[in-house]
Amino acid sequence: RVVVVGSANLDLVVSTPTLPRPGETVLGDALRTIPGGKGANQAVAAARAGARCDFVGAVGQDGFADQLRANLAEAGVELRRLRTVPGPSGVALIAVDADAENLIVVAPGANAELTSLDADDRAAVAAADVLLCQLEVPLPAVTQAAGWGRNAGTTVVLNAAPARQLPAELLDAVDVLVVNQVEAAMVAGLAAETGLDALLDALLRLVPRVVLTLGARGACYADRFGLRLTVEAPTVDAVDTTAAGDAFTGALAVAWAERRGPVEPAAVTAALRWACAAGAACAQRPGASTALPTRDEIDALYAQ
Ligand code: ADP
């Protein structure tokens, strides 16, 4: 079982020939409303990848909340821990031009209200194999959940996105940190052009295990116990890598939750390869959360 503590947003997307400049109005095409938010995306990714998955989050009192709930429920995500709070749901306003350049404004809405969790959330975290968090909900809630996870023996996986430097109280509770290269540098407080090994060394001073995603090149892993390895992603025709990171992270959490016995090199390699297959499967299809792969699709690409 995987518990996700995180955000749910509705992406309001309009394609326009050119992006508006300040003060300018442009005409776009039809509005598309697409469920998003890293928390909800990773919960859907984990559920489609075959895990029982609880989502701890918040939506507002508006029509958008119905769409967010329906999307999670359709993927099989359990919603007992999803609260409805007064005010609007989280929304991302997105304009995309013909070159796929975008302008994005996020209104966190209900996500910002998830400042502290309750005893039922704590029981859900304690009963899970893996707790999966991101940084799109207030840090106190993430820190609280991670501390509960650590105390209960639940593996705490943190996808540090959007990246920022993190308090020791949170880092001390994290088992596995998942980041891309840009996020890795932000979390480590190093320059963006820092080399991979130096990034991994710096992050291992903060947490015991690090997974670094490398886009089409796959992902690498390092831990404090001396293991360091890189796995390649399956080669695919990538048409849209939006949400590939969410597919990867959700699948990694599932692989980690299903792992039996100690974390030995073969199990780590298999988990990373399977997560890479999920990321690649997502990149093969247009769309963000709508492109998150099922377990069969991940297995098929993994077997190639
Ligand atoms: P993010 O979008 O968070 O920066 P990445 O771009 O590193 O994340 O992608 C996450 C994972 O998705 C990668 O580790 C890889 O496994 C997979 N992936 C992403 N882009 C591609 C691609 N073009 N081809 C194959 N796999 C990909």
Image: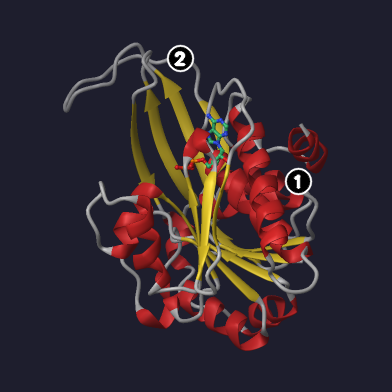
Task: Report the residue at 78% width, 57% height from top.
Answer: 51
Which quadrant holds the N terminus? bottom right
Q: Is residue 244 above or below residue 45?
A: above
Relative to 208, 266 lies left or right: right
Relative to 222, 301 lies left or right: right
Residues at marks 2 and 1, CA–CA distance in whole angstroms:
31 Å
The residue tagged 1 is: 48
Q: Is residue 283 visible?
A: yes
Report the residue that reaches farthest toward the bottom.
Answer: 151
Report helix, strand or loop for mark 2.
Answer: loop
| Residue 302, horizontal then vertical, whole percent | 74, 39
Mark 2 or mark 1, which is nearer to you?
A: 1
Q: In this view of the protein, which residue sits in the foreground, 60 or 216?
A: 216
Looking at the rendering, which quadrant does residue 201 occupy? bottom left
Looking at the rendering, which quadrant does residue 108 occupy? bottom left
The residue tagged 2 is: 29
Q: In this view of the protein, which residue sits in the foreground, 294 or 186?
A: 186
| Residue 5, horizontal then vertical, whole percent | 58, 65
Kind of residue sitting beneath label 2? Asp
Looking at the rendering, which quadrant does residue 225 occupy? bottom right
Circle 2 crowding by C-alpha within 10 Å: few under 14, some 14–19, many from 20:
few
Which quadrant holds the C terminus? top right
| Residue 142, horizontal then vertical, whole percent | 49, 72
Q: Is residue 57 above or below residue 26?
A: below
Kind of residue sitting beneath label 1? Arg
Task: Report the residue at 22% width, 53% height from top.
Answer: 191
